[in-house]
Amino acid sequence: MKTSHQALLALVVLFAAACGGSGSADSAKPATPTVAAVPQIPADAEIAAKAYDPGYTVPDTFFADLRSDTAGSYTIHHVLDSSQSYELCTDDLVEAQAWEEADNASRAVNGYYVTSIETNRYFEIVRELSYTQDVGNITTPTTPGFARVFKCGHTNRDGVDRNLLDGYAGRIDPALLTGARLQDFTEYLWQFAWFNVSHKKVIASRAGSAPDAMRHTLVLALVNNQGTGNCDRIDVVEWHFDANASSGEIHRRFDLHHSFEATLEGGVARLCD
């Protein structure tokens, strides 16, 4: 499956995160802020097993994209602003179609219009993309392309710097903000985060809380090769997405929890001393 999306970010690379105009979170602070207890990080042996498992990427209950069961190759693409920094949003289908049509004309591979669909998250314009030669895993002359424009009432990405792992991530309408909506927001955007294949492992996706904010955290395992004859270093990272209940603004923070060394021997993960 070729998910060529302009919405990804790099670790070594980046990620695309959230919504809404930038601005500071509500400055009111409770006298004694508290952080709710969250589940413990899994044991290193469990993390290593998942990190090395080629069939594992995310937990079983993780968000699955509407197009994930599409047969063969396809492309999911988010229409970006002119600076290529953030995904556009509108609540007007006609405007979304106009933006996508201009975007299609400027892309290296164009497609002819097939249909449009609408979900509570985005407008999606479906095109059949034409390839003049074999590109990546594209083996047929045409392949479906799904171009999306977010609905501002659901996901407002205005002003997000997609090159950053930390900082402003967007905005959700505070009237619609719930723990489930924040989780959905976080896991959806993860689908379009660009990490090295060996890095793209979500060990856990969990709810929590932070002072003055609702929180959702992705626990990531990042495998770093340290050269021939050496064990790999596995960095365990907590990627927090904190949503301010008053403004709906979301901020992300990429925190290294700890590192350990491991290796793969005979197809089995082993921790190194």
Image (cartoon, rainbow, N blue to C red):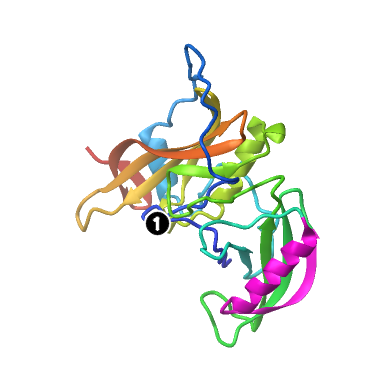
**Label 1 neighbour load within 10 Å: few <14, some 14-19, many 20+:** some
The amino acid sitting under disc 1 is: Val
Q: Is residue 77 above or below residue 142?
A: above
Q: Is residue 163 above or below residue 111?
A: above
Quadrant position of residue 48: top left
Q: Per the image, is 113 magenta?
A: yes
Measured as percent of width and height from the top left, residue 27 is found at 51, 26
Residue 80 falls left or right of residue 235: right
In the image, what residue occupies the spot 38% across and 47% down?
A: 222
**Stretch in magenta:** 92-117
Q: Is residue 122 above or below residue 260?
A: below
**Which secondary structure lies at badge 1?**
loop
Quadrant position of residue 225: bottom left
In the image, what residue occupies the spot 58% across and 62% down?
A: 80
In the image, what residue occupies the spot 69% across and 63% down?
A: 70
Q: Which residue position holds label 1?
A: 13
| Residue 245 visible | yes
Measured as percent of width and height from the top left, residue 68 is found at 66, 58
| Residue 62 visible | no
